[in-house]
Every structure is written in C-alpha cells, then in structure tokens.
Amino acid sequence: MHFDVFTLFPEMFSAYLDESILKRAREADLLRVELHNIRDYTTDKHHTTDDVPYGGGGGMVMKPEPIFAAVEGVLGAPPVCPVILLTPQGRRFTQKVAEELVQQERLALLCGRYEGVDERVRQHLVTDEISIGDYVLTGGELPALVMIDAITRLIPGVLGDENAASNDSHASGLLEYPHYTRPPEFRGWEVPEVLRSGNHAEIERWRQQQSRERTQQRRPDMLEGEE
Ligand code: 4HQ
C-alpha cells in the first residue's frame, strides 16, 4: 500500500511511522508513506498557504493553488488514485471502510488546517471525504495517521498470525473478551480459574460468553446490525 500525504506539517508523522508495526511494514515494503509539504508548492515570496475567507468571519482558509499544484504535481491531472480529504463533514471511518480502502494500491490523504480548505478543492480535486469521529481536531494529520494505521494492519503479512486482523473484535462483530497475563494473583486480584484450567473447550466457551455479555452491556448498537 502506497500513501501520499499532503500536509503543512510533515514532521508530525515520523514519531508514529518510525516505530513498531508500521516501521516493520515499511522496512518490508508492505507500506510506503510519502510526505508532501504543501508549502513547497507555493510560488509567492512568503510561501502563503492560507488566506482570509470571502464573506468575512473568523479564521483562515487554505488556498486552492498550492493544494492543486501539490496533488497534481505528484499524482497527475486527474490524479491516478483516490484523493481523500480528512474532515468532520466526511463519511465515518469504520473497520468496514478500512477493509474497503486496503483494496486500493495507492491513496492520497489531504490534511487541512485552520478552518479547512477552499470549497473548490473539495469539488474538483477530492474524490472522497472521511471523518474519524465527531470531535473537532486542529488538523487532519492525526486522522491521516489513524487511517494509515488501521489500513496497514489489514495488509496481508503485516501482522503475525497471533495478532491476525481476522481475530479482531471488529472483524468478529463483537468486543474482545478480557485478557490476563502473569502473575496469577496481583494485589489479591486473581486470574479467573477457567483460564488456568488448561481446558481449551471451556476457555473458548467462557471467552465467547464474555464477548457477548460485554458487547450487550457496552455496545448494544453492534448487536443490532447498525454501523
Ligand atoms: N478536522 N476527522 C481538519 C477534524 C477531523 C475529524 C478538523 C480535520 C479541522 C481543518 N478530520 N480540519 N474529526 O476534526 O477527520
């Protein structure tokens, strides 16, 4: 999977991409992330990327020219892959959307700042708009990292068998059962006897029951076939 990220803050990405599973995926050439600084595509002396909104009101809006120049300069006109804008106005990013997008060989992620991008970017460059949830962030960089993370772990070969994506709670449609490790007693709190019994059929039954109860209690919406 090849991601092209368009951002004013490319330095924000390395702390996350250069560690752990995403680092290993990149080293194995299962993941490639190219960071493109939108400011590099400005042509004026002050490298201006934003301007005041037409019609007044507060805040600043990202200018269209550097964004078009960056995306079309890297991906051609029209772009060779989907161009996704991270925005609270987009469709909600879910495990199902991650499974849909991992089928693409290349994705462009456009990270806005300030009040967002000029509407002509949305209308004539962007092909999909995605939100990671109903809260307001200061920019699209964290949403881009969230998408890269969730999509990359679905690429065959990225996770070991043990953590395979098919075992995930959202793949099964239920929340995960409780996990325990050693010691068997910590501050008087014991690991459930069944998990130490060695009876694998009973352990499997207990875990399934815990998953069902937990989902009913915490996320009844997941059992009603919505989302
Ligand atoms: N943003 N899911 C970028 C978000 C957001 C979200 C706020 C995106 C500010 C400029 N993006 N604008 N939630 O809160 O994707």
Image (cartoon, rainbow, N blue to C red):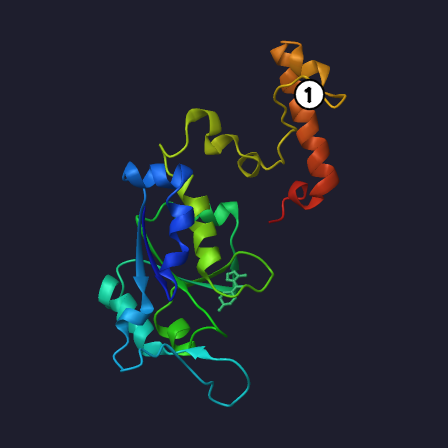
* Residue in front for this viewpoint, 123 or 75: 75
Left or right, 168 with reference to 29: right
**Up/down of 198 relative to 182, above or below:** above
> Could you tell me residue 227's position as x and y percent?
60, 49
Residue sticking out furthest to the right: 188
Q: Would residue 68 be found to the left or right of residue 216 on screen? A: left
Residue in front for this viewpoint, 71 or 95: 71
Residue at x 53% of width, y 36% of height: 171
Q: Which residue is mark 1?
A: 206
Number of residues whose C-alpha sits closer than 10 Å to that of mark 1, classed few (under 14), some (14–19) or many (20 or more)? some
Q: Is residue 154 visible?
A: no
Residue type, label 1: Trp
User: Residue 147's spot in the image, x, y percent?
Assistant: 45, 51
Which quarter shows the N terminus?
A: top left
Q: Is residue 187 above or below residue 130?
A: above
Side (left or right) of 173 relative to 73: right
Residue at position x 69%, y 31% from top? 212
Q: 101 and 9: which one is in front?
A: 9
Q: At x 75% / y 39%, what residue is drawn?
A: 217
Residue 126 or 183: which is nearer the viewer? 183
